[in-house]
Amino acid sequence: MASRYQEVYAAWKHDPEAFWAEAAKAIDWDRPFDRVFDPDAGVYGRWFPGALCNTCYNAVDRHVQNGHGNQLALIHDSAIAGTVRKFTYAELKREVVALASVLRNHGIAKGDRVIIYMPMIAEATFAMLACARLGAIHSVVFGGFAARELATRIDDARPKLIITASCGLEPGRIIAYKPLLDEAIQLARHEPDHCIIAQRDELRCELVAGRDIDYADAVARETAAGANVDCVPVAATDPLYVLYTSGTTGQPKGVVRDHGGHMVMLKWSMDHEFGIEPGEVFWAASDVGWVVGHSYIVYAPLLHGCTTVMFEGKPVGTPDAGTFWRVIADHGVAALFTAPTAFRAIKGQDPQGTFIPKYDLSKFRTLFLAGERADPETIKWAERMLSVPVIDHWWQTETGAPITQNPVGLGMLPVKYGSPGIPMPGYDIRILNDAGHEVPNGTLGNVVLKLPLPPGCLPTLWNADKRFHQAYLDEFPGFYKTADAGLLDDDGYLFVMARTDDIINVAGHRLSTGAMEEVLAEHPDVAECAVIGIADQLKGQIPLGLVVLNAGASREAADIEREAIGLVRERIGPVAAFKSVIIIKRLPKTRSGKILRGTIQKIADLEDWTMPATIDDPAILDEITTALKVRGLAG
C-alpha cells in the first residue's frame, strides 16, 4: 500500500496542536485539557495542561468495561523456569486492584514514590499498574543491579516502599535479590517504610519482621476481602514514573515521564508506527527495567488493547537459538521488537537459520529492531531467514517512543540499510556542527531535535531542572541534544553513526566507528563486532576492531583478520588508518545488549575504569584485557 507518511507528517508540521488534539481523542480523560500545549509551563512547555486522567484506567479498566475482559492481556513466558502464565484483562485488573489495596493499606498515595526492583515476572507489571492506579510514582530499577546502584536510586527517589522478589533467574544461575536489597538499604541515607517481597520457588528468602511483607499473602488477603480501589485521577502533567539512566558524572539521571502525553504518544505509535491492531499479540523482548520494557511491554500494548508477552530468558541458551521462534509460534505473535544484539547472537549460533522451519510463524509479520545501531548485514540476514519486513528505528530513554521509524501503520517506505528511518510526527531533526550551524545533507554532525519535544518525552529530570538544561538544552539553544552523531540524506532518512563520544579523530579526520562496524559485519565469518578508537601518539587516535566469529567458523584467525582489515580500507579508505583487528570470544555488554565500547577503550588506553553497573558478565572484561595484552595493545 502507498505510504501516507508524507501527508501525516506534513499535517503535524502544519498544526502540531491540532494533530495532537486529534490523537488525544483515543484516550479517556476524567477532565479535558485546558489547552493542548502551554509553551510557558515547565522547562520547555507542557502538554495537555488542566486535564485529569489515569494511566491504569486507560490500560486496564476501560477494556474490561468495554466488554473485553475475557481477552488475553498478559502472557508471562519464562524459558528459564519452563512456565507460562496467562492473564485476561479482567484477571489483570483483579491482580492490580489487590496489590493497589496492599499499597494503599501501607500508606501509599498520590505522589508517593515506589521503587520496583523486580525480575521479569508478571508481578512487575502488576506493580507498575498498581502504582499508576493510585497516582503513585514508580521507579523501576533493573533487577539484580548492584546494591550501591540501587542505593543511589533510593536516595534520589526517596521511596516510601520497595517492591522486589526473592530472586531473579539467569541461564545457569540464580541471583538472590534480597541480600542486594538489604545491603542497598543499609548503604542508603533514606530508608523505606516497607518492602513487599514476591517469593519465588527457585530461591525463597527470610523476611525482616516489621518491614517486609509477603507479596502473595498480602494480595491473597485483599482478594479474599473483595478489595476495591478506584483509579485516582491525576493531572496529565503529573509524573507517572521516574526511570534512571546513566549520567556522565556517575550520578544517575532520573528521567521523568508524565501521564497524559505519554498515553497519547504510545497509543498513537502502536497503530500508526507499529501497525498493530487491538487484540493482536505484541512482544517486546526487553526488560521492564529499561525504557523499552516500560513503553512496549507494559504501557503501549495495554493502552492499545493488545496481548503483551513478557519473556524471561535469552535469545540463545534457553535452551537454544530457536527460543524466539518457539515463543512466536506458541503465542501467535504478530510483531517482535528486540535489540539487534539479540539477532546477532542468534545469527552467530545458527547462521543458516536451521531452527526457523521447525516452528509455525504464520502469524508473525514484522520484526522491529532498536536499542543500538542495526548493522545492515544483521537486517539482511533476518530478512532472508524470516521473509518479513525488518524495521530498524531509533529513540532514547528520554523520548519514551520512536524518534525515527519506518511507519508500518501508515504504509511502509523503502528500507535504507543503515538508517533507522525518517522522523516521526513531533520530531524536527536537524544536523548541526559543533558551532551550532546546520550542515548540508550527507554531512556528519550532531543530531538535535528542535524544541518543543512532542508528547511523551521527558519534561525534565527528577528534582533537577538545572541539570536537565545542562545535559540537553544548553549546548545548542532552541534544540534538544541527543548526544548522537549522524547525518540526514536527501530523502530525509536519518543515519545515526555513533554516540558523539564514539566519533574518533584520526589525524584530524572525524570518523564514525559505526561506519567501520558496518563494513566489518559484512565479512561472512563475523557474527558481531565493535570498533573503538585507541590513543596514538602520531595520529591522535587509531581504530581497533574487535570481532566475534560465527559458530562453526574454522578458518585461520590471521586470514580472517587480514580480510576484515582489507574490507574496511577498501570501503572507507586509507584515511581510516584501520590496521588492527582482534578476534575474541565475546563482547562485553550491558544486560540490555549495548556493547561497552567506552570501557574497552579505557582498558586499551590504560586509563582508570570502574566495573559498569549494568554489565551482563564481568568475566568478559578479563578476556578482553588478556586479548589486548597479547597483541601489545593494553600495556
Image: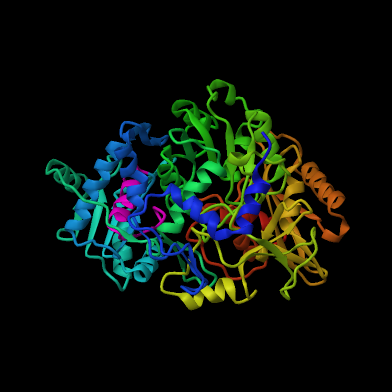
Q: Is residue 134 magenta?
A: yes
Q: Is residue 184 left or right of residue 439?
A: left
Residue 575, image quadrant? bottom right
Percent across and percent down for residue 20 are 52, 55
Q: Is residue 559 visible?
A: yes
Total labels: the figure holds 0
For the rendered model, the colour scheme is: rainbow
Q: Is residue 372 left or right of residue 592?
A: right
Q: Nearer the viewer, residue 472 or 181?
A: 472
Q: Nearer the viewer, residue 595 or 108?
A: 108
Percent across and percent down for residue 187 are 33, 69
Is 610 rendered above or below residue 80? below
Q: Is residue 629 magenta?
A: no
Is 229 rendered above or below residue 182? above
Residue 433, image quadrant? bottom right
| Residue that extends furthest to the left in the rendered view of this protein | 225
Percent across and percent down for residue 609 are 56, 67
Q: Is residue 397 left or right of residue 388?
A: left
Q: Is residue 591 visible?
A: no
Is 8 rendered above or below residue 486? above
Q: Which quarter shows the C terminus?
A: bottom right
Percent across and percent down for residue 135 are 30, 59
Q: Is residue 316 left or right of residue 193?
A: right
User: Residue visible at 29% across and 53% down?
Assistant: 133
User: Which residues are drawn in magenta?
Assistant: 121-145
Q: Which quarter shows the N terminus?
A: top right
Q: Nearer the viewer, residue 526 or 138?
A: 138
Is 304 rendered above or below residue 502? above
User: Residue visible at 35% across and 71% down?
Assistant: 155
